[in-house]
Amino acid sequence: MSKENHVLVIFPHPDDETFSSAGTIARYIDQGVPVTYVCLTTGQMARNLGNPPFATRESLPTIRERELEEAAQAIGITDLRKMGMRDKTVEFEPHDEMDAMVKSFIDELHPSVIISFYPKFAVHPDHEATAEAVVRTVGQMPESERPRLQLVAFSNDAPEKLGDPDILNEISDYKEVKLRAFEAHASQTGSFLEQLATPDVSGQAQSFLEVEPYWIYNFES
């Protein structure tokens, strides 16, 4: 990875950063690159309540906010911005307000790269709304001032439609960091961690600890 002046990470839910980017973020931080993580919601509408369950619908927002803070600490993130939006409603936020929020962080931090989701390949409506706001906002900037959009595509058809990832960050050196971040998100990742611990763990599950793929958004395509 090249030296960046600031990395801005924008995701809607606690644990989005861990599944997609924990190793990449930790490496940037080790390189001395400032990282700001903007998390839009506390994930209070998540279906999982722990495995075995230890949260309730009422306690989950507080638990997930604490898990987010602990995961950020595990990764090394010290600049965590919690926006307080309601989970599963990001798609209904007015576009101008979403875009103004994204632009305010760009104006404040002057990031050279933004990590977020790739539009139409992000699976969840909150993911898609976040991705669209990031791309819309950056697309309205003069080309010479745009940060690079280093985006996560979770849908299974992404490689077929987008081609191979533009960036494949090998993160084996940060496996323990990513595991600690997964463990911090205990209400959501218990079954996934159990899967990783099985002797015949699938290659797909194990790949979360080995490589983090990204696609660079091209405004010309």
Image: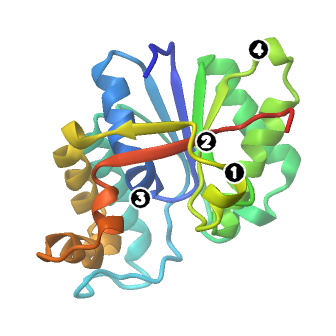
Quadrant the N terminus occupies: top left
Residue identifier under label 1:
162
Residue 84, horizontal then vertical, whole percent: 58, 55
Of the numbered discs 1 and 4, the one sitting upstream in the chain is 4
Circle on res. 15: 3
Circle 4 — which element? helix
Quote the CA–CA distance across marks 1 and 3: 24 Å
Quote the CA–CA distance across marks 2 and 1: 8 Å
Location of residue 142 with respect to 57 vertically, above or below: above
Q: Give the number of the mark in front: 1 or 3.
A: 1
Of the numbered discs 2 and 4, the one sitting upstream in the chain is 4
User: Label 1: how many residues lie within 10 Å, few (<14), some (14-19) or many (20+)?
Assistant: some
Residue identifier under label 4:
145
Quadrant the C terminus occupies: top right
- The amino acid type found where label 4 is placed reads Glu
x 43%, y 81%: residue: 58
Q: Give the number of the mark in front: 1 or 4.
A: 1
